[in-house]
Amino acid sequence: MSLRRYCSIIVGAMALSLTALRVALAHFDPETWRAVSVGGVLAAFNAAAAYALVAWSTGRSNVVFFRAVLGGTLGRMAALLVGVLVAIVGFGVPRLPLVASLLAYFVAFLVLELAVVHRRTGAQLEATR
């Protein structure tokens, strides 16, 4: 699966889930919705970066693969931390909805990434047999 298609799936999942949440939890104030949206966007960027690193490193040596994936994880976590701090300290986004949204979307996108990468590597293994 291409990075473009993977990103379109992420954006579609974000749009559908935020729309459903907006309808189901209409009583939340605008600041809470801003926090939920920011958390989702941070998680989406993290998911796209993770998939890009895996896609780039697939087919390269094991050392390159692990450096990209593990080093990329450290870099992505640092970027998420900076994003959360900027949102909370710089823009006054409410903490609890931001963190709850970030964690929920992070887990959902991690499940998606694992499924896609597993499917992709399984297809590559079948092709080499």
Image: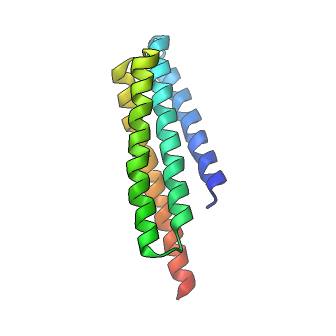
Q: Relative to the observer, which residue lies in front, 10 or 53? A: 53
Residue sitting at x 52%, y 55%: 51
Vertical arrangement, residue 17 with respect to residue 34, above or below: below
Give x and y (percent) for residue 98.
40, 26
The colour scheme of the drawn protein is rainbow
Residue sitting at x 48%, y 35%: 42
Residue sitting at x 41%, y 29%: 84
Q: Relative to the observer, which residue lies in front, 128 or 54? A: 54
Q: Relative to the observer, which residue lies in front, 112 or 62? A: 62
Q: Is residue 25 visible?
A: no
Give x and y (percent) for residue 11.
60, 40
16 lies left or right of 68: right
Q: Residue furthest left?
A: 96
Residue sitting at x 42%, y 74%: 62
Give x and y (percent) for residue 29.
46, 11
Vertical arrangement, residue 110 with respect to residue 58, above or below: above
Quadrant location of the N terminus?
Answer: bottom right
| Number of numbered tags placed on the structure image | 0
Give x and y (percent) for residue 53.
51, 58
Q: Is residue 59 visible?
A: yes
Q: Residue furthest bottom?
A: 129
